[in-house]
Image (spheres, coloured by chain):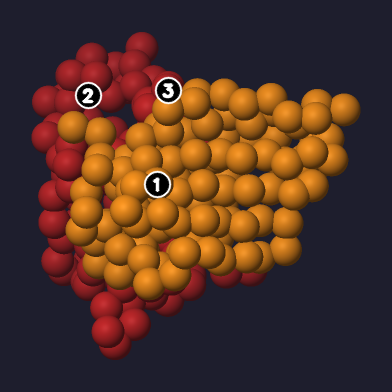
Chain colours: A orange, B red
Amino acid sequence: DQQVKQNSPSLSVQEGRISILNCDYTNSMFDYFLWYKKYPAEGPTFLISISSIKDKNEDGRFTVFLNKSAKHLSLHIVPSQPGDSAVYFCAASDTGTASKLTFGTGTRLQVTL
Amino acid sequence: DGGITQSPKYLFRKEGQNVTLSCEQNLNHDAMYWYRQDPGQGLRLIYYSQIVNDFQKGDIAEGYSVSREKKESFPLTVTSAQKNPTAFYLCASHLVFPGGGSEKLFFGSGTQLSVL
């Protein structure tokens, strides 16, 4: 039972444009959400997080939006850069923290010149 | 530099053999985790430990074992009972704040395990 779903396996965006990566979840107890970026054969690196008490969190070029009623979150990257090309994972927890995260299957973002 | 060190980077296992993946952190983190990544799948939790000498099974613990004798070390043994061990294994850790948990999980660089 996949509790965190990333339905788009891949996404291609031109440099300078906005990248929007989506994530849906089924567990209504999830109250903390994170996005990680991963390059091949490396460990994921933390990008941004959001608590369920918020609906938006920004950090530089990265913004995460949370729609609790739809059980949906999205990561916006503006402007997209070639170095953003990687696999992006969303993750969720029902502990209000980063403990015991449940990960999605990932979306491969390709930023083209 | 503080961080999480996983070794080896690549590991090969023969049929019926147990192998141990190393994970060491010098971040003084309380909690440590092992995740497994298969192609096209997300990271799945194998085992985790919130404090020394204590650990719990994750979602896919069968065929694996761990120990947590020291705060900085959390080795994972892939036993012969794990019939499909080929995967990318990731170790992670975080601090545990007084209220529990942490803001984010830090990952090591991973170990690719393959079966010969």
The structure residue drawn at horizontal position 68% and vertical position 39%, both measured from the top left corner, is A19
| Towards the viewer: A104 or A23 | A23
Specify the subunit that label 2 lies on. B
The structure residue drawn at horizontal position 72% and vertical position 63%, both measured from the top left corner, is A60
Image quarter where the C terminus of chain A lies is top right
Judging by the rendered image, the residue that carries numbered circle 2 is B17
**Do circles 1 and 2 both sit on a common chain?**
no
Residue farthest right in this picture: A113
In the figure, B82 relative to A64: above or below?
Answer: above
Residue B23 seen from this side: no
Q: Which amino acid, mark 1?
A: His
Q: Which amino acid, mark 2?
A: Gln
Mark 3–mark 2 CB contact (< 8 Å): no
Residue B40 marker? 3
Decide: few, some or many residues near mark 3? Use Cα within 10 Å; few <14, some 14-19, many ≥20.
few
Judging by the rendered image, the residue that carries numbered circle 1 is A72
Residue A48 seen from this side: yes
Give the Cα separation between the discs numbered 1 and 3.
Answer: 21 Å
> Left or right: where does residue B58 sit relative to residue A83?
left
Q: Secondary structure at mark 2?
A: loop
The structure residue drawn at horizontal position 62% and vertical position 26%, both measured from the top left corner, is A11
Specify the subunit that label 3 lies on. B
At which x and y percent is residue A51? 40, 68
Q: Secondary structure at mark 3?
A: loop
Location of residue A31 (image quadrant): bottom left
In the figure, A21 relative to A93: above or below?
Answer: above
Decide: few, some or many residues near mark 2? Use Cα within 10 Å; few <14, some 14-19, many ≥20.
few
The nearer-to-camera label among 3 and 2 is 3
